[in-house]
Amino acid sequence: MYDFQYHRPASLADAAKLLQSAGDDGKLMAGGQTLIPTLKQRLAQPSAVIDLGGIKDLAGIKVDGNAVMIGALTTHSTVASSKDVAGKIKALAQLAEGIGDRQVRHCGTIGGSIANNDPAADYPAAVLALNATITTNQRKIAADEFFKGLFETALKPGEIITSVSFPVPEKAAYVKFPNPASRYAIVGVFVARFGSGGTGGGVRVAVTGAGQGGVFRAHKIEEALSKNFSAKAIEGLHPPASSLNGDIHASAEYRSHLIGVMAKRAVAAAG
Amino acid sequence: MPTVNLTVNGKAVSANVEARTLLVNLIREQLGLTGTHVGCDTSQCGACVVHVDGKSVKACTMLAVQANGSKVTTIEGLANGDKLHPMQEAFREHHGLQCGFCTPGMVMSAVCLAKGHPNLTEKEVREGLEGNICRCTGYHNIVQAVLAGAKAMGG
Ligand SMILES: Cc1cc2nc3c(=O)[nH]c(=O)nc-3n(C[C@H](O)[C@H](O)[C@H](O)COP(=O)(O)OP(=O)(O)OC[C@H]3O[C@@H](n4cnc5c(N)ncnc54)[C@H](O)[C@@H]3O)c2cc1C
Ligand code: FES
Ligand code: FES
């Protein structure tokens, strides 16, 4: 690992200033569970690392009317064990519990996961399917506008995620087929239904692990589920292999098949 | 060079480190506590697990400077003099190791997992140890050891 300047600001305003003055070479750090492995492999060489860990008010969970707001620095293990999250959006607590392993969950954060937008990460599926809103130190960004491609987001240089607000669905479930070594998703499908009997917008389905451009919405499955929320209704509607990613872990054809299976399981689990 | 102040196994420690120094390197190379192992460079094996403020973390995936002000417990800090910690004793009793390389990390993960949960199930133990890899045992005896160790700890 190359050396760098280390900063641990105590406020969001100080973090933003430090990030700005570091220019292109500055890197934010939250839980470090992605950044540190990247630095160890010398895949990044920041001149400055700005550790958000000292900004206490970035961590925490609040139920706010019909939404659950999760601070950017909240760890996966805190989300997994939160009674508020379990009570309002059980699928989200279960998703957090399925990330990596206990040690990764004790450190890794929702803000870091979403900012990183790994195409096999779990949280992006929840953010997209639940139509969450991402709040930064500069603005609010809708989920549909946030994920821009592999490891790419709408975040601008200098922008810091402060929280993610998830609308509470009527029903939801997340089912993933994990890579047995890393627990990252080979395919993960998040299904959420809002309101009852709505047309089109009532059901949102997001797929992670499989897309050539990262997480995406499965519109055909959404349409079918809005008319008839049952596993039978989506038989054969999984996206074709030509639009999917294939690698040493799974071929595009296998991923296409898995999307169908995971989607049906998610619908069944959502009840 | 940044200075870090920590409590390691109950003793106050102060050390100068580079910003890039990993917690595991501080522990092994500067403090000489070589019970904490390094088994990979991809944050996957769990040989390096220690407790930071009571929670199990991978010491190879945390900067030493991040742990400034924290209480760190390593495998050397578990036993009480010659008396092994109940989880260590359970690993010995149930033959939960062969070469022993993964053992410090396994024990540290297991102690954190078992805290407050004396009646863990086999499924919970297997899921709780997903971040610890053992190339020798096939895990069976490790799981038996952790189930017994959790009972012996009594929560
Ligand atoms: C062994 C292992 C297994 C894993 N398995 C899974 C898995 O199964 N599923 C899964 O989804 N993930 C998995 N992960 C990744 C894990 O969830 C990471 O914690 C997460 O992706 C990054 O979060 P972090 O807080 O550690 O971020 P960091 O590593 O600190 O940062 C990641 C990136 O986000 C940026 N960033 C961090 N916080 C902010 C912010 N508030 N605003 C703007 N930018 C920010 C950083 O600059 C950096 O570029 C795994 C990791 C490991 C090491
Ligand atoms: S040395 Fe392998 S996870 Fe830390
Ligand atoms: S006992 Fe040899 S690696 Fe686990």
Image (spheres, rainbow, N blue to C red):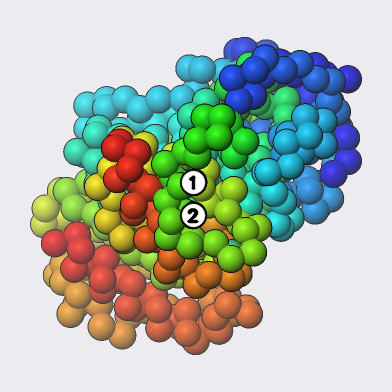
Amino acid marked by disc 1: Gln
Rendered position, B56 above or below A7: below
Indicate left or right for A114 with A88 as reference. Answer: right
Quadrant of res B52: top right
Chain name for mark 1: B
Rendered location of residue B124, percent (x, y)? 33, 55
Point out which mark residue B88 bears.
Answer: 1
Quarter of the image where the C terminus of chain A is located: bottom left
Residue at the image point whose x is 59% and y is 48% from the top: B104
B19 horizontally vs B94: left or right: right
Q: Which residue is mark 2?
A: B92
Q: Is residue A37 left or right of residue A238?
A: right
The quarter of the rendered structure image containing the N terminus of chain A is: top right
Query: Looking at this view, is B123 or A77 the one in front?
Result: B123
Query: Foreground residue, A187 or A151?
Result: A187
The location of residue B49, given as percent across then percent down, is 59, 44
Residue B78 location (% of width, % of height) = 53, 34
* B2 vs B27: above or below: above
Q: Is residue B44 visible?
A: no
- Mark sitting on residue B69: none
**Circle 2: element type:** helix
Residue at position x 59%, y 39% in the image: B75
Q: CA distance from mark 2 to mark 1?
A: 6 Å
Query: Measured from the top left, where is residue A14 in percent x and y?
Result: 67, 13
Q: Nearer the viewer, residue A187 or A6?
A: A6
Front residue of this view, candidates A121 and B97: B97
